[in-house]
Image (spheres, rainbow, N blue to C red):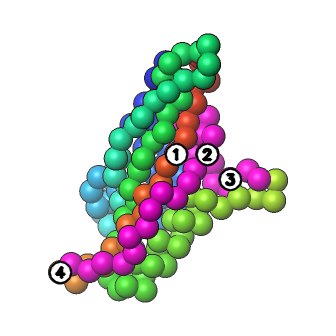
Amino acid sequence: MPVSGREVSLAVQRMLAAATTRSCGYGTAPTVSSTPSGAQVPYSVLYPLGVTTDGPPYGEADADARVLLQLTSVAATAEQAEWMADKVRSVMLGRKTSGAYTSEITVPGCVVMQRTLDKEEGVAVASGVYSYVQRYVIEVTTLNT
């Protein structure tokens, strides 16, 4: 079964909101009712940028996926935007001494094999709103091959 990009995105969104204690929107700013912090800045916004698939030898051709996500930290000041981006980076890439990630991404029917930072664009400002853009790659494999 191919990996669902949507399921990976939703799992990352849930994990980020829980681990950073700040709301994470999906393609748009969080709403006032978003948990845990509503639309209060700083927050992050997740943008799915696409999925490429392949498979293990002698297995299902689309059982593995490389999911590209953009996480944009949004804030009222440059310092706040960088602080939020640091939190996101720590949550996405932080590891325990055992080598396991500190914050687990739970995708139904899949296992996250690896996460990497693909690109950072740093702080930008438009109309008084500060943002910090980061792109991550999540490598996933299905459990049912």
Mark 2 burial class by Cα count in 10 Å: few <14, some 14-19, many 20+ = few
Residue under label 1, please give it.
138
In this view, which residue lies farthest toward the top?
Answer: 58
Residue 22's mark? none
Residue 38 image offset from top left, x and y in percent: 36, 64
Residue 74 image offset from top left, x and y in percent: 34, 72
C-alpha distance separating marks 1 and 2: 6 Å
Residue under label 4, please give it.
127
Give the mark, 3 or 2, whose residue is nearer the N terminus.
3
Residue under label 2, please give it.
114
Mark 1 burial class by Cα count in 10 Å: few <14, some 14-19, many 20+ = many
* Amino acid at circle 1: Ile
In this view, which residue lies farthest toward the right?
Answer: 98
Residue 81 image offset from top left, x and y in percent: 40, 78
Give the mark, 4 or 2, whose residue is nearer the N terminus.
2
**For the residue labelled by badge 2, is the local secondary structure a helix, a strand or a loop?**
strand
C-alpha distance separating marks 3 and 2: 9 Å
